[in-house]
Amino acid sequence: MKMIMTLAGMALVAFGVPSLAHELTLKVDKVKNVNGSLLVAVYDQAAHYDSNNQWVTVRKIKMVEGPILISLGDLPAGHYAVKLFQDENDNGFIDKNSIGIPTEPYGFSNSGGSFGQPSFEEAKVLLDKATEIEIQLR
């Protein structure tokens, strides 16, 4: 009897409590070449996003013909901002010209970045269910 009660309690917990984590998938489009790697960083706080550190998850993906689908796994519900770039020469940094404009393809969540890096508030997306974010390389 004790075993049945334990199993019943576990079933209630498993099926009665909504999931607190959701899958985040990126779809990266506008791939112009397959040189190098795609570096992806996901942030959950503006300060970390602005300083490019303490990301929630980070990935380095070998470039392939687009569109590229990247599963970032299950993340806790909340707001997230994504930034990525194609490291065409695999030097680990986004290359820029003499006035600071990126010379390698890049992108942000919420299609930001036309006039520089968007703020965390502009780039953030709500993850409250399985979500696919589409990012166009610029």
Image (spheres, rainbow, N blue to C red):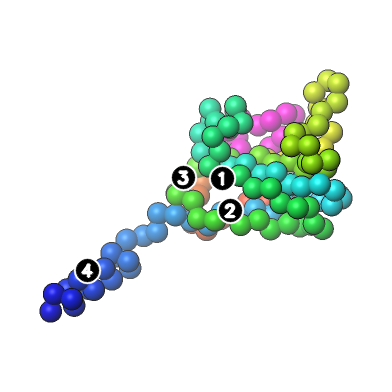
- Which part of the image, by quadrant, shows the C terminus? top right
- Earlier sequence position, callout 1 versus callout 3: 1
Marks 1/2 in contact by CB < 8 Å: the verdict is yes
Q: Amino acid at mark 4?
A: Gly
- Earlier sequence position, callout 2 versus callout 4: 4
Marks 1/3 in contact by CB < 8 Å: the verdict is no
Which numbered mark, 1 or 3, is in the foreground of this view? 1
- Which label is found at residue 72? 2
In terms of secondary structure, where does tag 1 sit?
strand
In the picture provided, is 3 more to the left or to the right than 94?
A: left
- Earlier sequence position, callout 4 versus callout 1: 4
Q: Does the rendering let one see residue 101?
A: yes
Name the residue furthest front: 91
Residue at which label 1 appears: 57
Distance Cα–Cα, label 3 vs label 2: 14 Å
- Earlier sequence position, callout 1 versus callout 2: 1
Distance Cα–Cα, label 1 vs label 2: 7 Å
Residue appearing at x 61%, y 44% in the figure: 58
Q: Amino acid at mark 2?
A: Leu
- Which label is found at residue 78? 3
Marks 4/1 in contact by CB < 8 Å: the verdict is no
Residue at which label 4 appears: 9
Which numbered mark, 3 or 4, is in the foreground of this view? 4
- Which label is found at residue 18? none
Q: Does the rendering let one see residue 124?
A: no
Distance Cα–Cα, label 1 vs label 3: 14 Å
- Earlier sequence position, callout 3 versus callout 4: 4
Q: Amino acid at mark 1?
A: Thr
Counting other residues with Cα less than 10 Å from the Cα at mark 1, is it few (<14), some (14-19), or many (20 or more)?
Answer: some
Distance Cα–Cα, label 2 vs label 4: 32 Å
